[in-house]
Image (cartoon, rainbow, N blue to C red):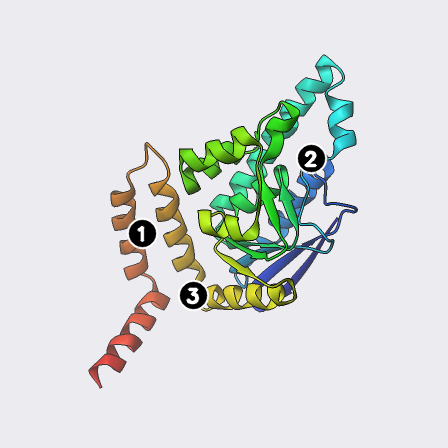
Amino acid sequence: MFETIVQGATLTVVMDRGPVNAINDDWIGALHGVLDRHEADARVRVLRFRSGLKVFSAGAEIDFLVERLSTRAGIDAMIATVRKMQAVYDRIERSPLVSIAEINGAALGGGFELALACDLRVASESATVGLPEARLALLPGAGGSQRLTKLCGAAIARRLILGGEVLDSAEALRLGLVQWVCPAADLPTRSDEVATRVEALPKHTLEANKRCILAAQERDANGSELEVEMTRLLYEHPESMRRLRAFLARRAK
């Protein structure tokens, strides 16, 4: 289901649940397991999601949905699954690791919600993204409506969600849903370049900056006060001071 590769400071999670990396309870549990094993590893700074298939992820497993939605008890169980998806995506979003979604094909529904939970998104020119749940008279309940609105604003969220629209990578880039687009053959290299830039930064620094960015998205958070708190922690960290002194010494020459 997931192959994990640690190279340098990057943990690459290769999703390989054929045929389309469909999501069910086992998938969610396995993803929690990956985070349990690697999140606290001091060597790892970057968490990258990559597909070993022709699509990134097509979302929830259809047979799983049909089975769950056929009875009242099944609906209750499906709501529990939605909460589990929310929890694991929240965990990725709030992780001290900087997360990258390497989108090589379709990222739809819960698959795109995974990508939206990541800090950075790199897509191939052949990729497509969307939250088309409304076509099935449903909604993107694993954080999709919330993260897409925070990312691109209510107008874009309404366009995609209420219209059930699926975008090509060029339009996704124009609207800010992904940060980089490249030819499919270049996608691993482009993703590596992004990961390498992040790897060069201290883990504690990345975590502090992530916390401040998240605070800016939360209505009841005091982001300015958190900036002061995180700044003090960084000033007191030996690695931050080492880098700062080295920078100042170079400037003084």
Mark 1 to mark 2: distance in Å?
38 Å
Mark 3 to mark 2: distance in Å?
35 Å
Please state if 91 lies on the left or on the right of 243 as rendered.
Answer: right
Q: Nearer the viewer, residue 184 or 188?
A: 184
Q: Is residue 170 visible?
A: yes
The local crowd at label 3, few if under 14, some if 14 to 19, many if 20 or more residues have their Cα within 10 Å, is few
The local crowd at label 2, few if under 14, some if 14 to 19, many if 20 or more residues have their Cα within 10 Å, is many
Q: From this view, report whether residue 252 is shown above or below residue 234.
A: below
Q: Nearer the viewer, mark 1 or mark 2?
A: 2
Q: Residue furthest left?
A: 252
**Nearest to N terminus: mark 3 or mark 2:** 2
Kindly identify the residue that appears in the image at 69 percent across and 22 percent down. 77
Circle 3 sits on which residue?
201
Give the image location of residue 193, x and y in percent: 52, 68
Which amino acid type is shown beneath numbered disc 1?
A: Met
Q: Nearer the viewer, mark 3 or mark 2?
A: 2
* Cβ–Cβ under 8 Å for marks 3 and 1: no
Circle 2 sits on which residue?
60
